[in-house]
Amino acid sequence: RLVRTSREPAFVGRAASTCVGRSAVVGAARAVRAFPLVSPAPLPLSSAVRSLSTGSKGAGVVEVTDDAEYSQALASKGLCVVYFTASWCGPCQKIKPIYEQMATDFPETTFIKVDVDECAEIAAGAEVRAMPTFHFMKDGKLAGPKSESELVGADPAQLLAYVKHWS
């Protein structure tokens, strides 16, 4: 099922800006597949997406694939923005190029991408219940109270405001 959280703007039609289901990985997948209107064709992969081996700050978006890479990326100094996403999530695909651009615009901040299907344990440990979810981390933990350092939904203006606030 698709819902709109209180921190997100209203959208026209049946589309929502968040994919929510019974679980962060399985339930939301079923929900989005049942709503073809919110699943646009996949966007081409940006050249800003790089592997962890290329570095973190100023290197674009760091894709993590396991716990070791995730821990290493979170250990970076300063702000670390973690983007929990899924390839089947329409709102995630819409916010993806904006997130990648922010990684270029804020070179002193580390931007991480976690695919919840490939890294289900990381997503479960972070208590991710909807996609997209953004966590704002410092020193390996949330930068503040969860209500202030977690953003759920694909709202570019709010994402930018959170990045500026925690930078």
Image (cartoon, rainbow, N blue to C red):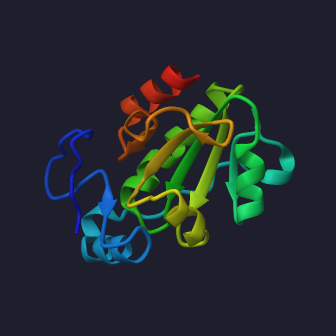
Please determine whether, in this image, residue 61 is positioned above or below residue 115: above
The residue most toward the left is 13
Please determine whether, in this image, residue 85 is positioned above or below residue 119: above
The image position of residue 140, as x and y in percent, is 67, 43
Residue closer to the observer: 79 or 115: 79
Q: Residue at x 33, y 78 (%)?
A: 30
Image quarter of the C terminus: top right
Q: Residue at x 52, y 56 (%)?
A: 126
> Seen in the image, is 53 located left or right of residue 9?
right
> Seen in the image, is 31 located left or right of residue 23?
left
Image quarter of the N terminus: bottom left
The image position of residue 72, as x and y in percent, is 78, 50
> Seen in the image, is 12 located left or right of residue 19?
left
Residue 162 appearing in the image = yes
Residue 51 appearing in the image = no
Q: Residue at x 35, y 70 (%)?
A: 28
Residue closer to the observer: 4 or 41: 4
> Seen in the image, is 151 located left or right of residue 140?
left
Count of numbered circles on the image: 0
The image position of residue 29, as x and y in percent, is 38, 74
Q: Residue at x 76, y 57 (%)?
A: 69
Residue closer to the observer: 57 or 102: 57
Residue closer to the observer: 35 or 28: 28
The image position of residue 87, as x and y in percent, is 50, 66
